[in-house]
Image (spheres, rainbow, N blue to C red):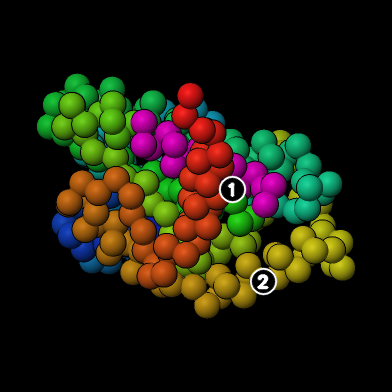
């Protein structure tokens, strides 16, 4: 479980542990990781923690090895760690783009690369849950590294599901809308190699968007509700996991525009 020390990842780790699963919690934030492991260990004996930066393939490889060493065979892998950074079209630095893409997209790829050979080798089947977002299904956030990374995770998960189904390995892509977590404070886990985050001009449209997102997060769904949906979706091998009612309206306009554009091309 990457990004398992807080938010949605912690809630999933808790739900999995309550369901009797052994869980390796992997996270970049050392204090939060320690606190998460000790909270879960109060009621679940088979909880371990490992420091992991999903942007670094070697770090993910070490986390995978720690999981094999602790538990033997691994069956469920949640590539959940994610960060958000944005700003207007003129304000997003290349460092922001690299950080968000490295964590949200490459982090998922690293998880698949490190665990897939193991799951295929033991032959007992398994399941990948890749955390995307509703921001991976419509362009509402505009020219944003977050949206770009999440569209990529949806696409990658769809392709992975088709390729792994014949091997008895399921894939789900988790697409929540707003959930009450600390994603709005992602900068707390920004490694120095990506430079410092640039403060937004408080009078800019980007600052207004960030403030609105913070309001939506505060009023968002509880992470435990997301976790319960994920557990059910793994059991039923569902590809798309939606968590909020009323999501249709968020995608209908985009899908309608795509279909209308296609209809402009008349048949020969
Ligand atoms: N909160 C929402 O409204 C929402 C909506 C849709 C999707 N998501 C996605 O859910 C996932 C979890 O986010 P959250 O909302 O729980 O936020 P969060 O900030 O509460 O939790 C994210 C966790 O990921 C960890 N993390 C950050 N960078 C990492 C790295 N490089 N390597 C390993 N761990 C790292 C953090 O320490 C933290 O424990 C993310 O992929 C996010 O994009 C969140």
| Predominant SS of the magenta segment | helix
Q: Is residue 81 above or below residue 210?
A: above
The residue under the point 33% across, 69% down is: 225
The residue under the point 59% across, 48% down is: 147
Q: Which mark is residue 147?
A: 1
Compare marks 2 and 1 and give the one earlier in the sequence.
1
Q: Which residue is more in the foreground, 15 or 230?
A: 230
Is residue 237 visible in the rendered image? The answer is yes
Tally of marks: 2
Q: Is residue 79 above or below residue 133?
A: above
Q: Which mark is residue 212?
A: 2
Q: Is residue 253 above or below residue 136?
A: below
Which quadrant of the figure has residue 102?
Answer: top right
Is residue 81 visible in the rendered image? The answer is no
Q: Secondary structure at mark 2?
A: helix
**Does the beta carbon of the residue at mark 2 sit less than 8 Å from ligand 1?**
no
Is residue 235 toward the left or the right of residue 184 in the image? left
Name the residue furthest bottom.
219
Q: Secondary structure at mark 1?
A: helix
Tell me the magenta residue range: 142-159
Picture coordinates of residue 125, whole percent (x, y): 16, 34
In the image, residue 12 lies in the stretch drawn in magenta? no
């Amino acid at each position: 479980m990457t990004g398992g020390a807080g938010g949605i990842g912690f809630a999933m780790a808790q739900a999995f542990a309550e369901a009797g699963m052994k869980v390796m919690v992997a996270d970049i934030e050392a204090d939060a990781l320690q606190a998460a492991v000790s909270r879960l260990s109060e009621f679940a004996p088979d909880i371990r923690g490992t420091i992991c930066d999903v942007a670094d393939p070697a770090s993910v490889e070490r986390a995978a090895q720690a999981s094999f060493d602790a538990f033997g065979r691994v069956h469920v892998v949640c590539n959940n760690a994610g960060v958000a950074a944005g700003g207007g079209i003129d304000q997003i630095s290349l460092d922001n783009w690299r950080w968000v893409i490295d964590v949200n997209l490459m982090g998922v790829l690293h998880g698949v690369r490190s665990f897939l050979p193991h799951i295929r080798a033991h032959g007992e089947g398994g399941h990948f849950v890749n955390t995307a977002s509703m921001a991976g299904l419509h362009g509402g956030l505009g020219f944003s590294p977050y949206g770009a990374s999440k569209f990529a995770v949806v696409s990658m998960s769809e392709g992975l599901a088709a390729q792994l189904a014949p091997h008895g390995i399921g894939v789900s892509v988790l697409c929540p809308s707003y959930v009450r977590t600390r994603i709005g404070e992602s900068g707390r886990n920004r490694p120095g190699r990506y430079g410092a985050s640039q403060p937004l001009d408080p009078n800019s449209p980007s600052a207004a968007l960030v403030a609105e997102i913070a309001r939506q997060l505060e009023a968002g769904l509880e992470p435990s509700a997301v976790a319960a949906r994920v557990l059910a979706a793994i059991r039923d091998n569902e590809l798309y996991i939606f968590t909020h009612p009323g999501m249709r309206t968020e995608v209908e306009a985009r899908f309608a525009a795509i279909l209308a554009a296609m209809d402009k091309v008349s048949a020969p």
